[in-house]
Amino acid sequence: MLTPPEASSEIAFPQTANFLAGRLRKHLEHDDLQYVESLIDGTLSLPARETLVERGQRTDVSSILISGFMFRTIETSDRRYIVGVHLPGDFVDLHGFALKRLDHSVVAVDDVKIGIVRHATLEGVMQERPKIARALWFATLLDASIHRKWIQMLERLDAPRRIAHIYCELQTRLELTNRASERALRTPFTQQDIADMCGVSPIHANRAVSKIRELELAEIRRGTLYTDNWDALREYADFDPSYLYGDGPLNLNEGWD
Amino acid sequence: MLTPPEASSEIAFPQTANFLAGRLRKHLEHDDLQYVESLIDGTLSLPARETLVERGQRTDVSSILISGFMFRTIETSDRRYIVGVHLPGDFVDLHGFALKRLDHSVVAVDDVKIGIVRHATLEGVMQERPKIARALWFATLLDASIHRKWIQMLERLDAPRRIAHIYCELQTRLELTNRASERALRTPFTQQDIADMCGVSPIHANRAVSKIRELELAEIRRGTLYTDNWDALREYADFDPSYLYGDGPLNLNEGWD
DNA sequence: CGCATCCTTGAGGGCCATCAAAATGCGTGG
DNA sequence: CCACGCATTTTGATGGCCCTCAAGGATGCG
C-alpha cells in the first residue's frame, strides 16, 4: 500500500512521517524533519472510543496522531456534536499549546496510537526554530480552513451530500499522506458517528446512506465506503479540494518558503 | 460609551487598542502593546460591501480591523456563504501570512477602516518576539474556536436560535472590547446577510426574526437587535461564551503567561 | 447461541425551500 | 416637500427534507 519513498520515510520518521505530508512537508529540509521527529517525547496507545482530552481540561502536552482515527467533539447533556475528524499525521490538540484549555474534547474512534510533545518543548521551538514554529502554526490554520468548509457544507448541502463530502475530504487527505486505496475508504465510523458529523438524526443518516447507494454513487457499509467512481461522488458533493492546501494543480499555497 | 481606561488605550494605541482585548491583552506588557502597535504599516478605508481579499489571491500583507464589520465568505456561482464575522480588534486575514493564499474572501459589511501589517514585518516577529508570535497564533486559534462553535450551532439549532446565537456571540465579543451597549446591538446586517450566516433562505430568515419578536426575546430591525433581556435570549440560544476564551469566570485560558 | 450493538423500515408532523407578490423604508432628484 | 425608484422586508401557498416515535432485522462477539 505504501510506495517505496513513503515507506522509507516511515522508517526514518516513525512518529512524524505523515506530518504535513502533501502540504508543507516537501518545503522542509531533512534536518527540519529530523528536528520535528525529535520533538516527540513518547507514544501512547488509546482504545477505541476513549477520550484523550476533555473539554476545559488543562494540559501541558500536545499529541500527534500516528495511527487510527480521532474526532473533535462538543458534548452536551443529551447529544454529541462532531466538529472535526483527524487521521495520521494530524496534531489533534496542538492548539492546546497556545489556548491552554480546549473548548472541545478529542476522542479516539478506533484504537489509536499518538505521539506526545511537551509544551515546554514547543516553547523551545518558538524561541529557536521559527521556521518549524510557522509550520506548526500552518497545521492549525489548516484545521481552521477545514472548519470553514464544514460550515459552508452545513449551510448548503443536504444530508446525503454532506456524507459524500466528508468521505471525499477524507479520501483526499489520505491521498496527501499516500494512505488512500483506490476503491475503498475504510473507516471505523458507525452511522451514529456519520449522523453526528452531519448534524442529522441517525435514522436520517441511514436513509441518506441508502440514497447514495440508490444513486449508484457508492456503497457505505459499516463505515467503509466502496466506489469505482470517485469523480461522480465528488461532483455530487460539489467537492473542491483546494481548502486542503494540497500540492496538487489547484494548490493555494505555492510559493511558501 | 468608552470608559476612561479604554479611552486612554485608544489614544495610546489608535490602531491596535482592541487587539485581544478581554483575552490575552492583559498578559502583555506595555512594551509588548507598543510593539504590536508599531507593526502597523498604514491604514486603509474600504467602502461598504467591498472585497478586501479575494479567495485564492496571493497577498503579502495582513489586516487588522479598526472600525466597522467584515465577513469571511465562500462564494459560488449562485450563492454566498458567510463563515465568520469580524469586528474591531480582529485580524481578518492573519492566516494569510502562513497560508499564503486564502481559501475564502474577506469583505467589508459597512464602511471599514483597517490597519496593514506587512508579512515581512511578521517574519521579524517570528524571529525576534516569540511571545508576540504566540499571541498572533492565539488570535488565529480563537477564530478556529469560533468556527467550531458555528459548526455545532449549525448541527443543532433551528434558524431563530441560530440568529439569537450569532447576536449573543457578537454582544459578548463587543463586551470583551468594551464596545457593547446595554440594550441595543447595532449591526449593518441585512436579512439576506443573516440568512447567509445561518444557511437558510432570506424568506425563512425573515420568519425566524419574526419568531424571535413574537417570543418577546428581542426585536431585530434593519440589523440592529433591541432587547432588555439578554439572559432570556442567551438561554433560548443555549449560548455558552466559554469558546470565546474571555477573562470572565468561565475562562478557559487562565494560566497563560 | 445468546446478547448487545448496529442497521433498517414505516408513519405522522415540523422546519425550511421555492415561487409569487405586496408592502415598507430610504435616498435622490424634482 | 413630495414623487420616484430601488433595495429590503413581509406575507401566502405548496412541497421536500428531516424530525421523532416505534418496531423489526442483521451483525459480530464471547
Image (tube, coloured by chain):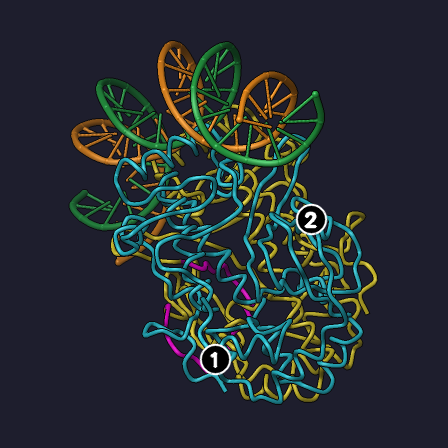
Chain colours: A yellow, B cyan, C green, D orange
Q: Quadrant of residue B130?
A: bottom right
Asked if the residues shown at circle 2 and circle 1 are in contact, with their CB atoms under 8 angstroms apart, the answer is: no
Instruction: Judge whether residue A68 is colored magenta.
Output: yes
For the residue labelled by badge 1, is the local secondary structure a helix, a strand or a loop?
Answer: helix
Q: Which residues are magenta?
A: A55-73
The chain ID associated with circle 2 is: B
Residue at image position (43%, 62%) is: B180
Residue B144 image offset from top left, x and y in percent: 53, 61
Residue D26 image offset from top left, x and y in percent: 34, 34
Residue at image position (69%, 56%) is: A176
Q: In the drawing, what numbered circle is on residue B5?
A: 1
Label count reads 2
Answer few, some or many: residues within 10 Å of disc 2's Cα (few below 14, many 20 plus, some between 14 and 19). few
Residue A131 image offset from top left, x and y in percent: 74, 78
First in residue order: circle 2 vs circle 1 = 1
- Asked if residue B212 is positioned above or below residue A25 in the image, the reply reads above
Q: Is residue B167 visible?
A: yes
Q: Which residue is mark 2?
A: B47
Answer few, some or many: residues within 10 Å of disc 1's Cα (few below 14, many 20 plus, some between 14 and 19). few
Q: Is residue A210 visible?
A: no
Is residue B169 found left or right of B104 in the rendered image?
A: left
- Asked if residue A92 is positioned above or below residue A119 in the image, the reply reads above
The residue lying toward the viewer, choosing from B14 and D29, is B14
Amino acid carrying label 1: it is: Pro
Q: How far, Cα to Cα, is label 2 from label 1?
A: 30 Å
Amino acid carrying label 2: it is: Pro
